[in-house]
Image (cartoon, rainbow, N blue to C red):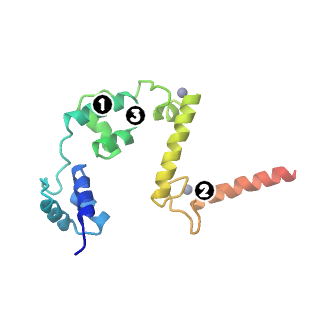
Amino acid sequence: MTDHSERDASIVLDYQSGLNHRQIAPKHDLRFQRISQILREQGVDTRPAGRPAPAISPAKRAVAIKMYRDSRSLGEIAEVLGRKSSAINKILRGWGEPTRKNKVPPCGAPSKYLYHRCRCEVCIAANTKRCKVQRHARVARGKCHHCRNPPAPGHTLCEVALSRLRKQWKTTMLKRRA
Ligand SMILES: [Zn+2]
Ligand SMILES: [Zn+2]
Protein backbone atom coordinates (compact mmCIF):
# COMPACT_ATOMS: atom_id res chain seq x y z
CA MET A 1 0.00 0.00 0.00
CA THR A 2 1.29 3.45 -0.85
CA ASP A 3 1.97 5.86 1.98
CA HIS A 4 -0.09 9.00 1.46
CA SER A 5 0.68 10.61 4.80
CA GLU A 6 2.75 13.41 3.27
CA ARG A 7 0.16 14.18 0.61
CA ASP A 8 -2.65 14.09 3.16
CA ALA A 9 -0.77 16.41 5.51
CA SER A 10 -0.30 18.92 2.71
CA ILE A 11 -4.01 18.70 1.83
CA VAL A 12 -4.93 19.43 5.46
CA LEU A 13 -2.53 22.39 5.54
CA ASP A 14 -3.93 23.82 2.29
CA TYR A 15 -7.43 23.43 3.58
CA GLN A 16 -6.68 25.09 6.90
CA SER A 17 -4.99 27.96 5.11
CA GLY A 18 -8.30 28.73 3.39
CA LEU A 19 -8.20 26.91 0.03
CA ASN A 20 -11.33 25.00 -0.91
CA HIS A 21 -11.73 21.45 -2.22
CA ARG A 22 -11.77 22.50 -5.86
CA GLN A 23 -8.57 24.51 -5.44
CA ILE A 24 -6.77 21.67 -3.66
CA ALA A 25 -7.88 18.74 -5.84
CA PRO A 26 -5.92 19.56 -9.04
CA LYS A 27 -2.68 19.93 -7.05
CA HIS A 28 -2.81 16.24 -6.25
CA ASP A 29 -4.59 15.03 -9.35
CA LEU A 30 -7.62 14.04 -7.31
CA ARG A 31 -11.34 14.66 -7.63
CA PHE A 32 -12.66 17.20 -5.15
CA GLN A 33 -14.95 14.58 -3.61
CA ARG A 34 -11.85 12.63 -2.65
CA ILE A 35 -10.50 15.72 -0.86
CA SER A 36 -13.54 15.79 1.47
CA GLN A 37 -13.03 12.10 2.17
CA ILE A 38 -9.35 12.61 3.01
CA LEU A 39 -10.11 15.58 5.25
CA ARG A 40 -12.70 13.51 7.11
CA GLU A 41 -10.23 10.64 7.46
CA GLN A 42 -7.71 13.11 8.87
CA GLY A 43 -10.26 14.24 11.45
CA VAL A 44 -10.47 17.77 10.05
CA ASP A 45 -13.59 19.79 10.78
CA THR A 46 -14.78 20.67 7.30
CA ARG A 47 -16.73 23.76 6.33
CA PRO A 48 -19.56 23.25 3.83
CA ALA A 49 -18.25 23.07 0.24
CA GLY A 50 -18.11 26.38 -1.57
CA ARG A 51 -18.37 28.41 1.64
CA PRO A 52 -15.87 31.19 2.27
CA ALA A 53 -12.66 30.49 4.19
CA PRO A 54 -12.92 30.51 8.01
CA ALA A 55 -12.75 33.76 9.94
CA ILE A 56 -9.29 35.18 10.54
CA SER A 57 -8.16 34.77 14.16
CA PRO A 58 -7.64 37.94 16.25
CA ALA A 59 -3.91 37.11 16.46
CA LYS A 60 -3.57 36.91 12.68
CA ARG A 61 -5.63 40.04 12.28
CA ALA A 62 -3.27 41.95 14.57
CA VAL A 63 -0.26 40.68 12.62
CA ALA A 64 -1.86 41.67 9.32
CA ILE A 65 -2.72 45.17 10.52
CA LYS A 66 0.80 45.69 11.84
CA MET A 67 2.27 44.51 8.53
CA TYR A 68 -0.04 46.84 6.66
CA ARG A 69 0.98 49.80 8.82
CA ASP A 70 4.63 48.83 8.38
CA SER A 71 4.08 49.18 4.61
CA ARG A 72 4.54 45.50 3.85
CA SER A 73 3.15 44.39 0.50
CA LEU A 74 -0.37 43.04 0.09
CA GLY A 75 1.18 39.82 -1.24
CA GLU A 76 3.10 39.28 1.99
CA ILE A 77 0.00 39.95 4.08
CA ALA A 78 -2.02 37.61 1.86
CA GLU A 79 0.44 34.84 2.55
CA VAL A 80 0.12 35.28 6.32
CA LEU A 81 -3.67 35.27 6.13
CA GLY A 82 -3.91 32.47 3.58
CA ARG A 83 -6.02 34.63 1.27
CA LYS A 84 -5.57 36.07 -2.20
CA SER A 85 -3.69 39.39 -2.33
CA SER A 86 -6.57 40.91 -4.30
CA ALA A 87 -8.82 40.33 -1.27
CA ILE A 88 -6.58 41.99 1.32
CA ASN A 89 -7.64 45.61 0.86
CA LYS A 90 -11.28 44.61 1.24
CA ILE A 91 -10.52 42.58 4.37
CA LEU A 92 -8.61 45.49 5.93
CA ARG A 93 -11.39 47.96 5.12
CA GLY A 94 -13.81 45.50 6.71
CA TRP A 95 -11.80 45.77 9.93
CA GLY A 96 -12.03 49.53 9.73
CA GLU A 97 -8.34 49.92 8.92
CA PRO A 98 -7.96 53.19 6.96
CA THR A 99 -6.23 53.02 3.61
CA ARG A 100 -2.53 53.84 3.65
CA LYS A 101 -2.76 55.32 0.15
CA ASN A 102 -1.90 58.86 1.25
CA LYS A 103 0.65 57.88 3.84
CA VAL A 104 4.24 58.05 2.62
CA PRO A 105 5.84 54.69 3.37
CA PRO A 106 9.35 54.40 4.85
CA CYS A 107 12.33 53.74 2.57
CA GLY A 108 12.74 50.06 1.80
CA ALA A 109 8.98 49.43 1.54
CA PRO A 110 7.92 48.11 -1.89
CA SER A 111 5.48 50.97 -2.52
CA LYS A 112 8.12 53.60 -1.71
CA TYR A 113 10.06 52.37 -4.74
CA LEU A 114 7.17 51.42 -7.01
CA TYR A 115 4.69 54.24 -6.47
CA HIS A 116 6.63 57.01 -4.75
CA ARG A 117 9.57 56.32 -7.07
CA CYS A 118 12.20 56.86 -4.40
CA ARG A 119 15.60 55.80 -5.72
CA CYS A 120 17.67 56.18 -2.56
CA GLU A 121 20.22 53.51 -1.64
CA VAL A 122 17.86 51.74 0.78
CA CYS A 123 15.02 51.61 -1.74
CA ILE A 124 17.22 50.39 -4.58
CA ALA A 125 18.75 47.66 -2.41
CA ALA A 126 15.31 46.53 -1.20
CA ASN A 127 13.97 46.48 -4.75
CA THR A 128 16.94 44.48 -6.05
CA LYS A 129 16.40 41.92 -3.32
CA ARG A 130 12.67 41.74 -4.03
CA CYS A 131 13.27 41.29 -7.77
CA LYS A 132 15.70 38.48 -7.09
CA VAL A 133 13.19 36.63 -4.90
CA GLN A 134 10.45 37.12 -7.50
CA ARG A 135 12.75 35.92 -10.27
CA HIS A 136 13.55 32.73 -8.35
CA ALA A 137 9.85 32.15 -7.74
CA ARG A 138 9.09 32.61 -11.45
CA VAL A 139 11.82 30.22 -12.52
CA ALA A 140 10.67 27.70 -9.92
CA ARG A 141 7.18 27.87 -11.45
CA GLY A 142 8.63 27.29 -14.91
CA LYS A 143 8.09 30.88 -16.11
CA CYS A 144 10.34 33.33 -17.94
CA HIS A 145 13.04 35.03 -15.79
CA HIS A 146 11.62 38.46 -16.57
CA CYS A 147 7.86 38.01 -16.66
CA ARG A 148 5.01 35.54 -16.33
CA ASN A 149 5.14 34.36 -19.94
CA PRO A 150 6.13 30.77 -20.64
CA PRO A 151 9.79 30.53 -21.71
CA ALA A 152 10.65 29.97 -25.38
CA PRO A 153 11.58 26.34 -26.13
CA GLY A 154 15.17 25.68 -25.03
CA HIS A 155 15.44 29.05 -23.23
CA THR A 156 14.90 30.39 -19.74
CA LEU A 157 13.41 33.59 -21.25
CA CYS A 158 10.21 34.19 -23.19
CA GLU A 159 10.11 35.43 -26.80
CA VAL A 160 9.52 39.04 -25.70
CA ALA A 161 12.54 39.08 -23.40
CA LEU A 162 14.66 37.30 -26.00
CA SER A 163 13.88 39.78 -28.78
CA ARG A 164 14.61 42.66 -26.39
CA LEU A 165 17.97 41.12 -25.56
CA ARG A 166 18.78 40.58 -29.24
CA LYS A 167 17.96 44.22 -29.97
CA GLN A 168 20.18 45.41 -27.11
CA TRP A 169 22.99 43.16 -28.28
CA LYS A 170 22.71 44.47 -31.84
CA THR A 171 22.96 48.11 -30.67
CA THR A 172 26.06 47.38 -28.59
CA MET A 173 27.73 45.62 -31.49
CA LEU A 174 26.97 48.52 -33.84
CA LYS A 175 28.30 51.00 -31.29
CA ARG A 176 31.48 48.98 -30.91
CA ARG A 177 32.01 48.91 -34.66
CA ALA A 178 31.44 52.64 -35.00
ZN1 LIG B 1 14.07 55.58 -0.42
ZN1 LIG C 1 9.48 37.27 -20.39
Residue furthest bottom as drawn: 1
Q: Quadrant of residue 61?
A: top left
Judge whether 99 appears above or below 176 on screen.
above
Q: Which residue is mark 3?
A: 72
- Residue at the spot x=35%, y=31% of the render? 68
**Label 3 neighbourhood size at 10 Å, few (<14), some (14-19), many (20+)?**
some
| Secondary structure of the residue carrying numbered label 1 | helix
CB under 8 Å between discs 1 and 3: no
Ligand 2 under 8 Å from disc 2 Cβ: yes
N-terminal of the pair, mark 1 or mark 3, is 1
**Side of 13 relative to 162 (left or right):** left
Q: Earlier in the sequence, mark 3 or mark 2?
A: 3
In the rendered image of this protein, does residue 61 appear above or below residue 20?
A: above
Rendered location of residue 138, percent (x, y): 48, 54
Mark 3 touching mark 2, by CB under 8 A? no
- Please state if 8 lies on the left or on the right of 85 as rendered: left
Q: Which residue position is annotated with label 2?
A: 161
Report the mark closest to the observer, 1 or 2. Answer: 1
Within 10 angstroms of label 2, few (less than 14), some, or many (20 or more) residues? some
Ligand 2: which quarter?
bottom right
Spatial separation of the CA atoms under disc 3 and disc 2: 29 Å
* Element type at mark 2: helix
Decide if residue 119 is in sight here. no
Q: Which mark is residue 65?
A: 1
Towards the viewer: 42 or 126? 42
Q: CA distance from mark 1 to mark 3?
A: 10 Å
Tell me where residue 64 sits by quadrant. top left
